[in-house]
Image (spheres, helix red, strand yellow):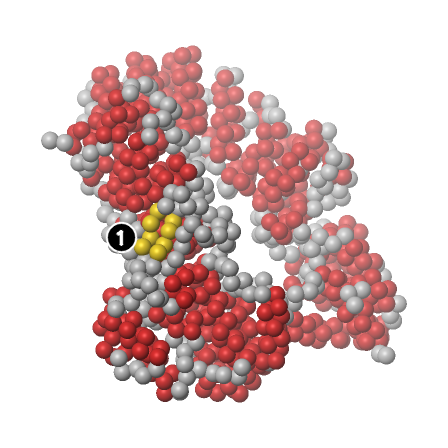
């Protein structure tokens, strides 16, 4: 047996320790022999494995140690250990094993390797990477320490140092003994990626975090305190997100500054725009300096003006309270305080405006004409009652001219379909380069090419796919994987190696296909499954019927008729799921025009298509809200005798399982592009326990589809508008604006559905109100008012001793929406709340809306 065969046997047995012992005993010639074989073997693995189902960690460790011991140059070893296919995550043995086989190398060589490894590091962007960061970092860090070389200024090296920081009860002692400490700590305030790493470290480790360790080492003099303080301030001035700056704010606060150490000018600079953790810190420190009588008047004016402009109610309130406290002691600061109060009069929240107005009235006798002018200008946009109170002290205040509301902008669907694939080589290359998960348009394009090209020249397609490594598609496929990405590779495998594909299919049949799933998922999977089965049997078709001709998923009726004619000429019957999917993708408004042309088709499927077109396509199923259902939505077909899959799509109700999780949600809008309300109902029923980002990604596509928009659309839209993440809510607002601009928004149904979801505890009213507020700002005044009016009617009809959380916010947005549209809506429920009296915000907002609506009536 050859030397390489011995090493290869250990590698294939995943015996990393045995590989290390074997290669450590090799002479120079033996190492050269192994080094010559390793790259080719790795290339072979890459071609033949394709996301293999086995865990590669142990085999990768054997390959790594073999390369570290046998490759000659430091550049070669650095490239080998950094190879993306050979990464080992959070292994305790891998670094020690590799360091052991490297110890025979000269120190300058190892120092060079350390520098090269560090330079090759890239920032970690995913949480799972931070939890299990690559062991290559430990190799590089150990080599840096052992050789005494200064590590290059690589930001990823700093982030990895944070990720590997000790986090146990003795983390301070371990950190104190870290030989890299003095080099790394200053870089925490400079390196990109360090804030994210520190934030994750603090979140995960709490009192055993790196932040607490730095505070402890500073207290004992191990780390210079000025360096930590200056570094934090530099990060504050640089800016960042709230999450990324939180660890620096925590570090700065825990260092417990003396008055002399507080850089008040720097904190006054960051106060207007800093994220909330830094703004909170800045306010506390500036207030502390001012309470000690050491904050000059200009900085006070700058700070309170910045606080009055902040979006956080807590900080605005704190700034107004600060002004009130200070002016009692120093009336000379009334001018600055009044200017800040004038800024706060522009806040959206009515309680903040009222508080600012009260403060302005208190400061008026102590301020000059400049402050009075600022209040008069800011008060022009206030409600009439507040304007009148301020006018009594500051003089006449003219209300703002009623400006026309901004017009809704039509958001066009600018998507286009990629061109069809006509070359066998192009098809083989693209299918080999396809990456998970991929877009539906890309898959449809590849499926169409696969079917058409195999019918035209099956041997040529087989040769091209074989050359592209399609036989490797047998790996990485499991019975639980039902994504189109996997089915597409199974179809390619069925072309080049039908026997291998049939073995996989037999295995899936033994495990059992998951038929018990949401109907939109099932039709996608059955269509792909029947293509695989056709190719396994050695059959081909000239064309797929259901390939869309429009980005929405629609098929031009004339194109579908020509595809049916191609099947007839080839004496072939269409695939069942593909045919039903094609019927669902026909546009309803153009169906009857093509019925006469379809009447010349001779096959049973052709005659069915002609009848389908003659009836105008699928009649709109009835979508209704049912309060007693788990999912709240029911769908019923409008006629009997529909094909099996289509009937299943049109039937949704009480008996549907709530355990369904969508497998292919990005495909759903294209399943029934002329019946978006049905797909929206499936979304709402099956997605209740899934992440909101899934809904947010699909909803904007769904609203560009066609068909009625009723209870299903309203429920799906309301659930996204009520998400906790403001980014996801923003996607919902975009969808609302598209429907509103197209005059397709079911505004009253959206309001009614939202109210029912609030009652059921499925929707938080304050989030829903915040989303509608953004829609008002974008110009959807009339639509939002109709939505809010419907919501209020249902919520206020039931008497409650205590108003619902968020009700005041919703009423305030209703007032904002009603102001430019001047609706003459009968809303007695608001009058009832307003007439109850009281000083709660809900009562005040109700009185404000009642008075506004009263002014619209003749």
User: From this viewpoint, which residue is outermost toward the front?
Assistant: 640
Q: Residue furthest left?
A: 858
Looking at the rendering, which quadrant does residue 604 occupy? bottom left
Picture quadrant of residue 783: top left
Frontmost residue, 842 versus 412: 842
Residue identified by numbered label 1: 744
Q: Residue at x 75, y 75 (%)?
A: 37
Residue under the image location 17 percent in, 36 percent down: 824
Q: Is residue 415 visible?
A: no
669, 327: nearer the viewer: 669
Residue 412 at x, y percent in the picture: 30, 58
The x and y percentages for residue 197 are 61, 45
* Nearer the observer, 360 or 531: 531
Please state, as top left, top right, bottom left or bottom right, where the N terminus lies in the image.
Answer: bottom right
Of 708 and 168, the residue lying toward us: 708
Is residue 836 visible to us here?
yes
């Amino acid at each position: 047996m050859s030397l390489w065969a011995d090493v290869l046997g250990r590698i294939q047995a995943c015996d990393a320790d045995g590989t290390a012992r074997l290669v450590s005993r090799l002479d120079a010639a033996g190492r050269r022999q192994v080094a010559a074989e390793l790259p080719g073997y790795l290339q072979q693995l890459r071609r033949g494995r394709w996301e293999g189902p086995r865990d590669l960690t142990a085999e990768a460790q054997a390959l790594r140690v073999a390369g570290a011991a046998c490759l000659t140059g430091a550049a070669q070893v650095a490239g080998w250990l950094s190879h993306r296919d050979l990464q080992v995550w959070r292994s305790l043995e891998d670094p020690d094993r590799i360091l052991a086989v490297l110890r025979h190398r000269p120190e300058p060589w190892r120092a060079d390797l350390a520098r090269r490894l560090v330079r090759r590091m890239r920032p970690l962007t995913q949480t799972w990477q931070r939890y299990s960061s690559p062991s290559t970092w430990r190799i590089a860090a150990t080599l840096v320490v052992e050789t005494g070389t200064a590590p290059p200024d690589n930001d990823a090296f700093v982030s990895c140092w944070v990720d590997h920081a000790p986090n146990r009860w003795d983390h301070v002692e371990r950190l104190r003994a870290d030989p890299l400490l003095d080099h790394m700590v200053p870089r925490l305030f400079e390196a990109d990626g360090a804030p994210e790493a520190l934030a994750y470290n603090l979140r995960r480790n709490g009192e055993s975090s790196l932040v607490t360790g730095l505070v402890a080492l500073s207290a004992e003099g191990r780390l210079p305190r000025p360096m930590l303080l200056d570094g934090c301030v530099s990060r504050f001035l640089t800016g960042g997100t709230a999450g990324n700056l939180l660890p620096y704010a925590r570090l700065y606060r825990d260092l417990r500054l003396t008055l002399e150490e507080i850089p008040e000018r720097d904190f006054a600079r960051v106060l207007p725009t800093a994220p909330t953790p830094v703004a909170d810190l800045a306010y506390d420190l500036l207030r502390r300096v001012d309470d000690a009588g050491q904050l000059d008047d200009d900085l006070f004016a700058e700070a309170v003006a910045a606080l009055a402009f902040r979006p956080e109610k807590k900080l605005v309130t704190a700034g107004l309270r600060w002004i009130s406290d200070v002016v009692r002691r120093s009336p000379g600061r009334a001018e600055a305080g009044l200017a800040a109060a004038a800024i706060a009069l522009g806040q959206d929240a009515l309680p903040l405006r009222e508080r600012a107005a009260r403060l302005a009235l208190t400061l008026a006798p102590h301020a000059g004409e400049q402050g009075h002018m600022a209040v008069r200008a800011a008060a022009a946009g206030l409600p009439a009652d507040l304007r009148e109170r301020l006018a009594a002290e500051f003089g006449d205040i003219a209300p703002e001219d009623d400006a026309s509301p901004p017009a809704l902008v039509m958001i066009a669907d600018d998507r286009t379909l990629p061109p069809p694939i006509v070359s066998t080589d192009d098809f083989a290359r693209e299918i080999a380069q396809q990456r998970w998960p991929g877009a539906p348009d890309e898959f449809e394009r590849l499926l169409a090419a696969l079917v058409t090209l195999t019918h035209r020249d099956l041997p040529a397609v087989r040769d091209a796919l074989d050359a592209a490594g399609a036989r490797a598609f047998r790996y990485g496929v499991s019975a639980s994987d039902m994504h189109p990405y996997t089915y597409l590779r199974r179809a390619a495998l069925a072309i080049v190696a039908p026997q291998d594909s049939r073995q996989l299919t037999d295995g899936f049949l033994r495990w059992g296909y998951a038929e018990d799933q949401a109907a939109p998922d099932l039709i996608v999977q059955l269509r792909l499954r029947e293509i695989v089965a056709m190719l396994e049997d050695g059959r081909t078709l000239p064309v797929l019927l259901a390939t869309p001709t429009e980005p929405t998923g629609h098929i031009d009726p004339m194109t579908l008729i020509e595809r049916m004619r191609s099947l007839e000429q080839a004496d072939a019957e269409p695939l069942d799921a593909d045919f039903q999917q094609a019927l669902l993708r026909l546009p309803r408004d153009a169906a009857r025009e093509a019925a006469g042309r379809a009447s010349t088709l001779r096959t049973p499927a052709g005659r069915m298509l002609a009848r389908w077109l003659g009836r105008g396509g699928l009649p709109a199923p009835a979508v209704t809200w049912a309060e007693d259902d788990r999912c709240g939505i029911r769908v019923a077909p409008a006629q009997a005798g529909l094909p099996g899959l289509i009937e299943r799509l049109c039937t949704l109700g009480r008996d549907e399982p709530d355990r369904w999780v969508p497998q292919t949600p990005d495909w759903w809008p294209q399943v029934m592009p002329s019946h978006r309300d049905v797909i929206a109902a499936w979304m709402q029923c099956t997605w209740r326990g899934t992440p909101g980002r899934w809904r947010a990604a699909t909803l904007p596509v769904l609203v560009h589809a066609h068909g009625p928009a009723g209870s299903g659309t309203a429920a799906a839209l309301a659930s996204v508008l009520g998400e906790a993440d403001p980014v996801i809510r923003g996607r919902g607002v975009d969808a609302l604006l598209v429907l509103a601009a197209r005059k397709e928004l079911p505004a009253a149904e959206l309001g009614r559905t939202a109210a029912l979801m609030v009652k059921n505890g499925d929707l938080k009213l304050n989030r829903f109100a915040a989303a509608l507020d953004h829609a008002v700002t974008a110009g959807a005044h009339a639509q939002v008012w109709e939505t809010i009016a419907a919501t209020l009617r249902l919520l206020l009809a039931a008497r409650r001793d205590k108003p619902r959380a968020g009700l005041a916010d919703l009423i305030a947005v209703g007032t904002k929406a009603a102001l430019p549209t001047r609706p003459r809506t009968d809303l007695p429920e608001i009058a009832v709340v307003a007439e109850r009296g009281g000083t709660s915000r809900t009562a005040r907002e109700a009185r404000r809306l009642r008075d506004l609506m009263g002014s619209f009536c003749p």
